[in-house]
């Protein structure tokens, strides 16, 4: 083992094959954050679960991955980055198969917990590898490729999951990981470089406090809607545990000589700003994806496959700007690209505030493409700038913190828009429904000639009011997300251009 700090990058053979193998593993893991959502009704019937308990299939995976993600940096430095990555991919594939073979809800939850544990390190370590094997001037292209899997995976996940569930069986939502995982494992095993290990003490107390904070926060966000949030004692307990865990962790890493996560990485202005930015991107990306499928199903009556086809152009927009941004980041100030992407995202959300139950699919597609263009234009230069000035020795921990922050942002974003949606539906329906009485003369144009405002007619009008109240509530959510994105734009002023890269070190794959 060596205690020498890592160089800025390593020259390796077969860089293209390494990148392909890493991306197969990354896409496989990211897909599983959303691919199982649409299969829950079928799982519930086969596993004998209730409407409430089946959600533990999602919660167990999210909580396990969130807790273990910060460990990826320590494990990779202590036991070897290549070795940990291979174990993660192999374990993820094995637990995916076990999830597909589950015979009861407890077995499914146990296997999903294990799947989250093994999958937690895949995304941050794949980013670390790509930063390590590419010189600084190629980081933009590397992050474009990596970001494509991160951003497009959640978009196509529900569509692929719906298609597999409808055409075959919900179990194939998990079995699909087998061929992808095998190819990723073989490629990584053959071509990933073996890097020096670092003798690093494990800060158990620091990890325990961070795990307590992250785990309690994720449970609170995931369970809140089911138990009516702060009306339940459970949520207050989880909030207290989360606050205590994060507070003690922050104090510990500040005062400890060898903390679990070195706070000096946050002294890098680009990385600290990038953490805030990726939190906002997490809110916008998955909050939008959480809102649109139920909106298209409930208000527009779209089946799962049609919903996927309408949302697919969003992924196309993301791919286009990611490919372009990987090249543009070399010639255009990356900060300008970030601001341009945020403005496009704001434009897309503004378009979405004009949705109505009577519109066709074109406005959905246009807003999706614009939002995809914006998010893609943000993600690549942001990922490049966040690590541009950070010391290479912090990369393993920094990428795990980067991924953790994005995931927490996604969870918080989904919870915020869900709470606002539920509350605003009730408020809007109360306001609209207040006039649905037999004594309202304004109802006359809505009642068929020769009929009176009977209970049946009023019930029909109440159904229309429900749709209108729901649509207004979705628009309110889009408006809030637009304001959050606008508020993030001034943060670009805190970013700075990277300096010159240091010399590379040659490393050969096994």
Image: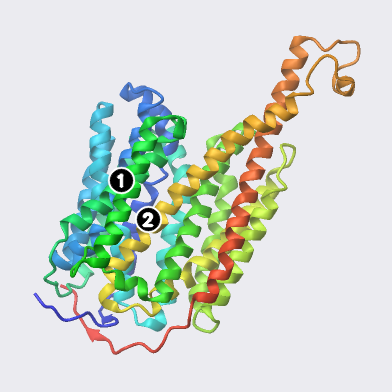
Q: Residue 347 appears in which quarter of the rendering?
A: bottom right
Compared across the picture, whether 110 is left or right of 150 comes to: left
Are there few (<14), some (14-19), or many (20+) residues within 10 Å of tag 2? many
Are there few (<14), some (14-19), or many (20+) residues within 10 Å of tag 1? many
**Residue, x 38% and y 52% (percent of image)?**
30
**Residue, x 45% and y 62% (percent of image)?**
278
Is label 2 in a helix, a strand or a loop?
Answer: helix
Figure check: 297 above or below 78? above
- Give the alpha-carbon distance from disc 1 to disc 2, as whole Å: 24 Å
Q: Position of residue 352 (x, y in %)?
A: 67, 49
In this rendered view, identify the residue nearer to me: 295 or 462: 462
1 vs 2, front mark:
1
Quadrant of the image containing the N terminus: bottom left
Report which residue position mark 2 lands on.
27
Compared across the picture, whether 80 is left or right of 334 comes to: left
In this rendered view, identify the residue nearer to me: 235 or 506: 235
Is label 1 in a helix, a strand or a loop?
Answer: helix
Report which residue position mark 1 lands on.
215
């Amino acid at each position: 083992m060596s205690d020498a700090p890592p160089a800025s990058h390593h020259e390796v053979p077969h860089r293209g094959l390494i990148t392909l193998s890493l991306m197969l593993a990354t896409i496989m893991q990211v897909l599983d954050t959303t691919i199982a959502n649409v299969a829950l009704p079928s799982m519930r019937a086969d596993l004998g679960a209730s409407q409430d308990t089946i959600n533990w299939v999602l919660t167990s995976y999210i909580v396990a991955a969130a807790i273990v993600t910060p460990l990826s940096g320590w494990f990779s430095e202590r036991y070897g980055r290549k070795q940990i990555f291979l174990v993660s991919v192999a374990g993820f594939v094995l637990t995916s198969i076990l999830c597909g073979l589950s015979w009861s809800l407890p077995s499914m939850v146990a296997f999903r917990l294990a799947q989250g544990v093994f999958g937690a390190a895949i995304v941050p370590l794949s980013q670390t590898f790509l930063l390590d094997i590419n010189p600084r001037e190629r980081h933009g292209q590397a992050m474009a490729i990596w970001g494509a899997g991160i951003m497009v995976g959640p978009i196509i996940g529900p569509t692929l999951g719906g298609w597999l569930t409808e055409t075959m069986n919900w179990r194939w939502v998990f079995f699909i990981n087998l061929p992808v995982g095998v190819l990723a494992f073989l490629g990584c095993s053959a071509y990933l470089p073996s890097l020096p290990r670092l003798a690093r003490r494990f800060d158990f107390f620091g990890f325990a406090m961070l795990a307590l904070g992250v785990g309690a926060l994720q449970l609170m966000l995931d369970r809140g809607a089911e138990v009516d949030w702060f009306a339940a004692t459970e949520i207050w307990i989880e909030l207290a545990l989360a606050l205590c865990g994060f507070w003690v962790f922050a104090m510990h890493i500040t005062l400890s000589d060898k903390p679990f996560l070195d706070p000096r990485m946050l002294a890098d202005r680009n990385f600290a700003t990038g953490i805030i930015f990726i939190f906002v991107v997490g809110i916008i990306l998955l909050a939008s994806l959480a809102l649109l499928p139920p909106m298209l199903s409930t208000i527009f009556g779209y089946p799962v496959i049609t919903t996927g086809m309408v949302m697919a152009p969003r992924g196309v927009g993301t791919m286009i700007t990611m490919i372009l941004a990987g090249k543009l980041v070399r010639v255009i100030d990356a900060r300008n690209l970030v601001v341009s992407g945020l403005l496009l995202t704001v434009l897309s959300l503004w378009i979405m505030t004009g949705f109505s139950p009577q519109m066709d699919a074109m406005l959905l597609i246009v807003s999706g493409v614009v939002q995809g263009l914006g998010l893609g234009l943000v993600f690549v230069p942001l990922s490049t700038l966040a690590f541009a000035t950070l010391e290479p020795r912090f990369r393993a921990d920094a990428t795990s913190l980067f991924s953790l922050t994005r995931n927490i942002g996604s969870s918080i974003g989904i919870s915020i828009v869900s709470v606002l949606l539920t509350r605003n539906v009730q408020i809007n329906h109360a306001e609209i429904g207040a006039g649905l009485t037999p004594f309202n003369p304004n109802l006359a144009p809505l009642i068929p000639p020769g009929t009176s405002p009977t209970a049946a007619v009023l019930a029909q009008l109440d159904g229309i009011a429900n749709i209108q109240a729901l649509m207004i509530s979705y628009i309110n959510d889009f408006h809030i997300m637009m304001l959050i994105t606008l508020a993030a734009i001034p943060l670009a002023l805190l970013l700075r251009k990277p300096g010159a890269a240091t010399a590379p070190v040659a490393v050969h794959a096994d």
